[in-house]
Image: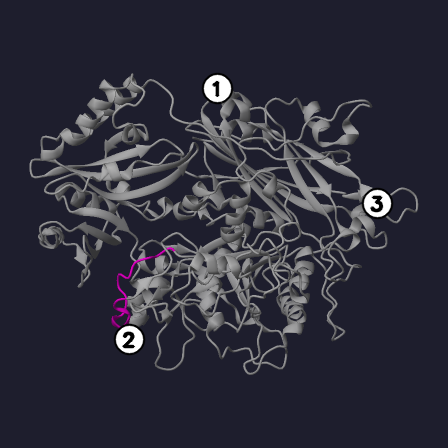
């Protein structure tokens, strides 16, 4: 895929509206296996392997070759066959990584093949070719999952997310190097190379049964030279023990790290967007925060409280909310240019607590303070505190759904009303968040899903999380709710007291503390969390009696400074995850000033991807219902900063912001009916897609809007349904003309006597109707198929469904219209689809490739 170095394209056309009546709908699915010329496939792989194994003339000291086996998209390699585990000298599988390209998920396995075992795989390929015409070709399981073979580089050994591999190959950084444990000489060979080339290493090694781990400071080019010189490397990762190192240093040494980062630091301008942290207060004098948090932007929800923080949580959140990855900023050598600033509102008193029933009111007052102080500033409100969830109740329905789970509260409804844009009137001590006489001012809230606080080492952590619903107010429909996943699953660099502890969550899977919406009533309540971000991990003691989070499994951040104490500490869980997502949202605001909060939320979710660990669960899912359960566990996955901010020549993102009038009524009727739908005919790379023919491409659609809440609990149906209105999207199918598509969606577009076209969900969508038609104010799905089919799918309809405005005449504000945001992206293999679409939007635009 090309570099993401181009801005997303904003479409000014708000869609063509037409009178609308909803048609009925249904569901669908897909599947396939290996096809093609077996003999030709085997012969090609054999040629590629022979070329990979050919020894360069200057490579006389090597004892073997690293070879990368690449799978077909969507297929897994036969990893056990790649790692025979025979006695004596044999090929060794050293690392496996996965990446997603336009064709789908690809698995890459790196195998070290000793010189004396070069024939091992060549013989198997020969037998496959010789038996290719038989019903059961020899070694078919091994060969038919392999798309290509090539000589490996250090990129194949990188097992952290692909976008975290350093783009600068000449600047020295710290690497976590995993060595193959062989005859015992690997440490000496590694140390000798480092000493010869003047490369710094950590003082200590960590040994496992078949791996030795060490930190190395080197450029990517220097590391590549190491890879070409010795046969001991197995895996490369980002270092995860810098947090442990820094927090254990004395205060004067921590100050040196602070000073070094400040020399490279460029704060955002005073007018830049801000993350407004609603928490325990932020220490504005912290040297890593001071240039980004003015004393005028530090507030209290209650004027009787002092501004300076007493508790450290807010300052800890500030380090992540400002830098996103403070550890990465400290470990790097490049200038750090911040795109956003901070604001702080002390949300809690320094002693005692707010009564839970009043959290909605406290939130409204907290929001009011910075909006008065800096009325013209764009901001993201970050709330990483939640109300403690009650213990699981016994009154579950027959499907295991908790009857109370997902229901709105006064706090979550206040968040929804504030996000929808209701004005705040605090002249009366009572909460008045639905001031309908003023123009709406939508707001973006980023809220933590809440944590499980009583973990047991014996728990199945995924089952436990599936049973523990997100905490109030994370069930808010309009908020961007953030859960946590674990990016680290090893104990490298763990403090001495944690010897023998074992991480609970595998790397890339849900954090053991993170809550979900699996037990929500799916017909009524949206999926939560929307996304997940790194929240560290939890480790269990060897005897299984206790759990804890050592610093090597946590995230580095800023510390509330007290005399004699340092500048850094570690934090974890869904609050840490929320701060990182808030930082990303504010950076999107900075990159695209003027976009609505609904659009910022859409771009964050649209950028998210499931990790390999999450996708492994999806591949085992038997149907769309099971996939929907995974959506309620992981959301759409981990947001990707680059995808959220930029497009590429072959990965295009289109943004449309529009308005729709959901309902109307005849005469003095109390109950209304749907009024209109909008048809978006998007600028589309039709010719370029058609030229690709049957090449596999990927389409992603995200619809985001804010609802006005109806928080009173009166059955949550009919006129008392929670959302003011609902919107859905439908996309033109390859076999449709624009007119047949309109008739398929809109009954009013049909001529009298027309037979309604079928509405089963089109094959190729990941979630289909289980997500596209689900409750909530954000709908996103992914379609994969041939480029020629996608070429004719450039029409999208946005239409209304039921909401309480429809049946409550006195409160219906349909006449004013409601905003929505539509984000659509296309990923095509190595073809420029960006330039022709950019020229359709503005023919004068010239894009250099």
Residue 557, horizontal then vertical, whole percent? 40, 66
Q: How many labels were placed on the picture?
A: 3
| Marks 3, 2: nearer the viewer | 3
Q: Secondary structure at mark 2?
A: loop
Label placed on residue 691:
1
| Magenta residues, start to end | 487-500
Left or right, 472 with respect to 577, comes to right
Label placed on residue 78:
none
- What colouring does the structure picture have? one colour
Give the distance between the C-alpha atoms of the residues marked 3 and 2, in whole angstroms: 68 Å
Between residue 264 and residue 687, name the one nearer to us. Answer: 687
| Marks 3, 1: nearer the viewer | 3
Q: Secondary structure at mark 3?
A: loop
Q: Secondary structure at mark 1?
A: helix
Query: Which quadrant of the rendered structure holds the C terminus?
Result: top left
Badge 3 density bin: few <14, some 14–19, many ≥20, Cα 10 Å: many
Residue 177, horizontal then vertical, whole percent? 22, 52
Residue 370 appears in the rendering: yes
Q: Where 501 falls versus 701 (above or below)?
A: below
Q: Are marks 3 and 2 in contact (CB under 8 Å)?
A: no
Left or right, 481 with respect to 491, comes to right
Between residue 24 and residue 387, name the one nearer to us. Answer: 24
Left or right, 107 with respect to 478, comes to left
| Residue 402 lies in the magenta-colored region | no
Q: Where 327 falls versus 300 (above or below)?
A: above
**Residue at figure coordinates x 36%, y 54% from the top left:** 506
* Marks 3 and 2, the one that precedes in the sequence: 2
| Marks 1, 2: nearer the viewer | 1
């Amino acid at each position: 895929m090309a570099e993401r170095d181009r801005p997303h394209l904003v479409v000014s056309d708000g869609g063509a509206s037409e009178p609308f009546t909803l048609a009925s709908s249904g569901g669908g699915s897909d599947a396939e296996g290996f096809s093609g010329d077996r003999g030709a496939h085997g012969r090609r792989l054999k040629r590629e392997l022979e070329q990979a194994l050919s020894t360069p003339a200057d490579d006389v000291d090597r004892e073997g070759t690293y070879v990368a086996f690449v799978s077909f998209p969507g297929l897994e390699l036969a990893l056990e066959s790649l790692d025979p585990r025979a006695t004596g000298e044999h090929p060794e599988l050293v690392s496996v990584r996965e990446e997603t390209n336009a064709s789908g998920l690809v698995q890459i396995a790196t195998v070290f093949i000793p010189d004396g075992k070069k024939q091992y795989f060549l013989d198997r390929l020969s037998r496959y070719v010789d038996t290719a015409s038989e019903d059961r070709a020899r070694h078919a399981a091994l060969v038919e999952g392999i798309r290509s073979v090539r000589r490996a580089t250090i990129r194949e050994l990188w097992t952290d997310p692909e976008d975290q591999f350093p783009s600068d190959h000449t600047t020295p950084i710290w690497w976590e190097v995993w060595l193959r444990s062989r005859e015992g000489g690997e440490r000496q060979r590694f140390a000798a190379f480092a000493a010869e080339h003047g490369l710094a290493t950590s003082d200590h090694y960590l040994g496992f049964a078949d791996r030795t781990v060490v930190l190395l400071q080197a450029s990517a080019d220097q590391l590549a030279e190491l890879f070409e010189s010795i046969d001991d490397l197995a895996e490369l990762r980002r270092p995860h023990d810098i947090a442990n190192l820094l927090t254990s240093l004395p205060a004067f040494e921590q100050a040196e790290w602070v000073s070094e980062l400040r020399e490279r630091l460029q704060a955002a301008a005073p007018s830049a967007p801000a993350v407004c942290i609603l928490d325990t207060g932020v220490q504005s004098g912290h040297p890593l925060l001071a240039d980004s948090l003015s004393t005028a932007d530090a507030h209290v929800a209650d004027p009787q409280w002092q501004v300076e923080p007493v508790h450290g949580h807010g300052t800890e959140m500030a380090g992540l909310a400002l830098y996103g990855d403070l550890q990465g900023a400290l470990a790097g050598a490049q200038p750090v240019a911040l795109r956003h600033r901070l604001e702080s509102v002390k949300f809690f008193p320094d002693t005692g607590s707010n009564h839970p029933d009043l959290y909605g009111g406290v939130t409204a007052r907290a929001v009011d303070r910075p909006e008065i102080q800096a009325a013209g500033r764009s901001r993201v409100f970050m709330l990483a505190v939640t109300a403690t969830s009650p213990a699981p109740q016994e009154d579950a329905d027959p499907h295991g759904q908790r009857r109370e789970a997902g229901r709105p509260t006064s706090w979550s409804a206040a968040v929804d009303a504030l996000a929808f844009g209701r004005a705040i009137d605090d002249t009366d001590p009572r909460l008045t968040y639905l001031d309908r006489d003023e123009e709406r001012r939508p707001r973006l809230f980023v809220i933590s899903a809440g944590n499980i606080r009583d973990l047991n080492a014996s728990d199945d952590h995924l089952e436990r999380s599936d049973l523990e619903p997100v905490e109030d107010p994370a069930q808010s429909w309009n908020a961007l709710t953030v859960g946590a996943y674990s990016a680290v699953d090893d104990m490298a660099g763990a403090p001495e007291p944690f010897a023998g502890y074992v991480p609970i969550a595998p790397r890339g899977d849900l954090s053991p503390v993170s809550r979900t919406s699996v037990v929500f009533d799916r017909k009524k309540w949206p999926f939560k969390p929307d996304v997940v971000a790194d929240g560290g991990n939890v480790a269990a003691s060897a005897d299984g009696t206790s759990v804890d989070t050592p610093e090597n499994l946590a995230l580095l951040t800023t510390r509330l400074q007290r005399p004699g104490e340092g500048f850094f500490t570690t934090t974890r869980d869904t609050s840490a995850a929320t701060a990182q997502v808030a930082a990303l949202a504010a950076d999107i605001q900075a990159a695209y000033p003027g976009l609505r909060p609904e659009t910022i939320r859409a771009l964050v979710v649209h950028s998210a991807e499931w990790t390999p660990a999450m996708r492994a669960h999806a591949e085992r899912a038997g149907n769309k219902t099971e996939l929907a359960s995974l959506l309620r566990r992981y959301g759409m996955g981990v947001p990707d900063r680059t995808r959220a901010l930029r497009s590429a020549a072959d990965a295009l993102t289109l943004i449309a912001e529009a308005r729709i009038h959901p309902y109307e009524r005849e005469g003095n009727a109390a109950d209304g009916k749907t009024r209109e739908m909008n048809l978006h005919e998007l600028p589309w790379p039709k010719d370029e897609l058609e030229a690709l023919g049957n090449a596999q491409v990927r389409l992603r659609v995200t619809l985001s809007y804010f609802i006005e809440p109806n928080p009173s609990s009166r059955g949550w149906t009919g006129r008392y349904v929670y959302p003011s209105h609902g919107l859905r999207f439908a996309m033109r199918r390859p076999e449709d003309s624009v007119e047949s598509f309109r008739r398929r969606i809109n009954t009013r577009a049909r001529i009298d006597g027309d037979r309604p076209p079928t509405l089963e969900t089109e094959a190729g969508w990941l979630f289909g109707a289980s997500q596209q038609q689900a409750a909530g104010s954000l709908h996103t799905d992914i379609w994969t198929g041939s480029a020629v089919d996608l070429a004719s799918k450039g029409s999208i309809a946005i239409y209304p469904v039921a909401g309480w405005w429809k049946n409550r005449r006195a409160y219906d504000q349909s006449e004013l219209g409601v905003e929505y945001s539509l984000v659509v992206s296309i990923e095509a293999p190595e073809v420029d689809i960006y330039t022709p679409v950019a020229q359709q939007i503005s023919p004068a635009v010239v894009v250099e490739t």
